[in-house]
Amino acid sequence: MPPIVPIYTLLLSYFISQQLNSFPFQLLHCNLFASFQELANPQKTLEETQNEGVVIALYDALKIHDAEAVQKILAPDLEWWFHGPPSHQFLMRLLTGSAEEDTDTSFTFLPHRISAFGSTVLVEGFDQTRTIAWVHAWTVDGIITQVREYFNTSLTVTRFGKTDKSDYSSITSLHCPSLWESSLPNRVGKSVPGLVLAI
């Protein structure tokens, strides 16, 4: 049975396919800064707190190599997306059991910052020498169903919305506030690519 694709993913895919000619240029004009009220609201919902707890439990289980706990936290058909050098697929090797046992070459995920936005939980970290920065974007629905990995990449997370709810025919009325930006790529000491993740 194929994985169920969230309706917002289907709608966004359709929207982009319909507006492909003008989309890249209009996106540049999006308002990348949320209103002060959106950013200043420090209150987390119960769902966000619970979702953060699930992700923290995963990192705790990974740290002590508790395979049984990891299996309970991750969906068996986990959807995976990776951006970075193939040599940096540490999480995939760790979860599939193909990680080398040599402690000199094993990678330890050290979370630096965790933020939740509904079902999306963002975790930013670095390796022990701070030469590799990474971001994980987890989708949590009771358990973790999806992960997007970014290595040595500057990531900006936005939420698409309409500023004029009466007009859905024009892409120019899109409003995409910046909800979160990675901070660690500056520490790797080199230029890194930048990506935008829309949630």
Image (tube, helix red, strand yellow):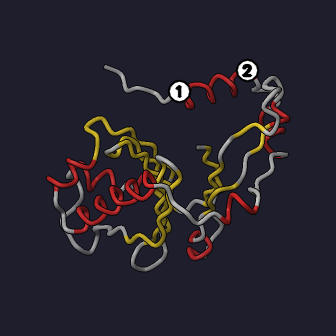
Q: Which residue lies furthest to the bottom in this view?
A: 129
Mark 2 residue crowding within 10 angstroms, few (<14) / some (14–19) / many (20+): few
Residue 54 disc label: none
The residue depicted at 33 percent of the width and 39 percent of the height is 78
**Mark 1 crowd level (few <14, some 14–19, many ≥20, 10 Å Cα):** few
**Residue for point 26% across, 75% down:** 104
Return the x and y of residue 74 as percentages of the image width and height: 28, 46
Q: Where is residue 49 in the image (x, y as percent from the top left)?
A: 42, 59
Hey, what amino acid is under mark 2?
Answer: Gln
Q: In which quarter of the image is residue 59?
A: bottom left
Could you tell me the amino acid type at mark 1? Ile
Question: Which corner quadrant holds the N terminus?
Answer: top left
Mark 1 lies on residue: 7
Choose the circle earlier in sequence order: 2 or 1. 1
Against 173, residue 168 (above or below) is above
Question: Residue drawn at (75%, 63%), measured in percent from left and top?
Answer: 36
Residue 19 x/y as whole percent = 76, 25
Circle 1: element type = helix
For the C terminus, the image quarter is top right
Q: Callout 2: helix, strand or loop?
A: helix
Where is residue 141? Give x, y as percent. Answer: 38, 42
Task: Answer whether residue 85 is visible to the viewer in this image.
Answer: no
Q: How far apart are marks 2 and 1 (CA)?
A: 16 Å
Q: Is residue 56 visible?
A: yes
Q: Quadrant of residue 110?
A: bottom left
What residue is pinned by disc 2? 18
